Amino acid sequence: MKVIILAGGFGTRLSEYTDLIPKPMVTIGNRPILWHIMKTYAGFGYKDFILALGYKAEIIKDYFLNYRAVNSNFTIDLCSGHVVPHHLDSLDWRVSLFDTGERTMTGGRIKRLREFIGNERCMVTYGDGLADIDLHSLEKFHLSHGKMVTVSAVRPGARFGELDLDGDRVISFQEKPQLKDGWINGGFFVFEPGFIDLIDGDDTMLEREPLERAAKRGQLMAYLHEGFWQCMDTKRDNELLQSMWASGVAPWAKNWSHTNAS
């Protein structure tokens, strides 16, 4: 199953870093948060990624284009250009990178990828949120209810789209209201291909009309994730994630094959 990561926003609340680099490239340890998110998916066997780029897209493209060289040790003969690798940091991921427009909204980015997704179910998440979510359980839940969309509902403190739930069925979807019951939009979606038809175009926010329409039609379900979830929306958020990683206690990495890669 393809995994779409929305990695094109401006990240204005993290301007200490994003004046120079796109938000998904802000590091935890010495790796971008985008890499941490992808490692989480890869730990469950989801390794076919589509990155929806926008703001400073060239920096993310350059990172993956030069990934093996930058993350490996090698000897190079500057006369012949011959390279002898000594240690390869090899990842068996397939990464497709598409510039979906600097000012395109989250829904519009997905719409622009339609031909690359094909008529397939896919996973979608944001390029700034980490969780210790069981992605196999998420997919199993999605298949069990047969609806168009599954969103992962999480319980941190305020600021995001609140889900009004009846059991695990989403009754309404409201972006950034005052929280009532504590469940919010944590990303980590599963979409059926027909969901893209609910997205109008570049100016459409995923979190507004498309998900609101799905909820009204009874086609939006919530996977309740009670475990760790943390977005990186501010410098303080980044410092929190940095401290977790440095301490060796990074909950989002527990399902990785190599828990604390450098």
Image (cartoon, rainbow, N blue to C red):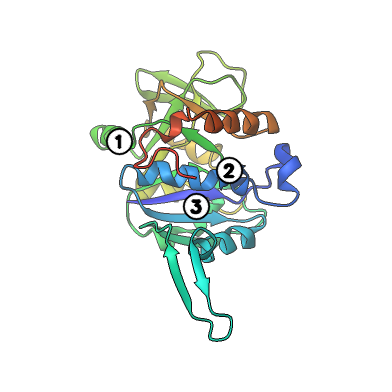
Q: As displayed, is residue 212 above or below residue 158?
A: below
- The residues tagged by marks 2 and 1 sit, at their Cα atoms, a distance apart of 22 Å
Q: Relative to 222, is 178 on the left or the right?
A: right
Residue linked to disc 2: 205
Identity of the amino acid at label 2? Met
Q: What amino acid is labelled 3 in the image?
A: Ile
Is disc 3 placed on a helix, strand or loop?
A: helix
Residue at mark 1: 142
Contact? badges 2 and 3 (CB < 8 Å) = no
Mark 1 / mark 3, whichever is N-terminal: 3
Could you tell me residue 37's position as x and y percent? 47, 43
Give the label, 2 or 1, closer to the camera.
1
* Among the two numbered marks 2 and 1 on one chain, the one whose residue lies closer to the N terminus: 1
Q: Nearer the viewer, residue 87 or 143?
A: 87
Is 102 left, or right, of 257 in this rendering? right
Contact (Cβ within 8 Å) of mark 1 with mark 3: no
Residue at mark 3: 110
Number of residues whose C-alpha sits closer than 10 Å to that of mark 1, classed few (under 14), some (14–19) or many (20 or more): many
- Circle 1: element type: helix
Q: Residues within 10 Å of mark 3 (few under 14, many from 20)?
A: many
From the viewer's side, name the closer residue of 13 and 240: 240
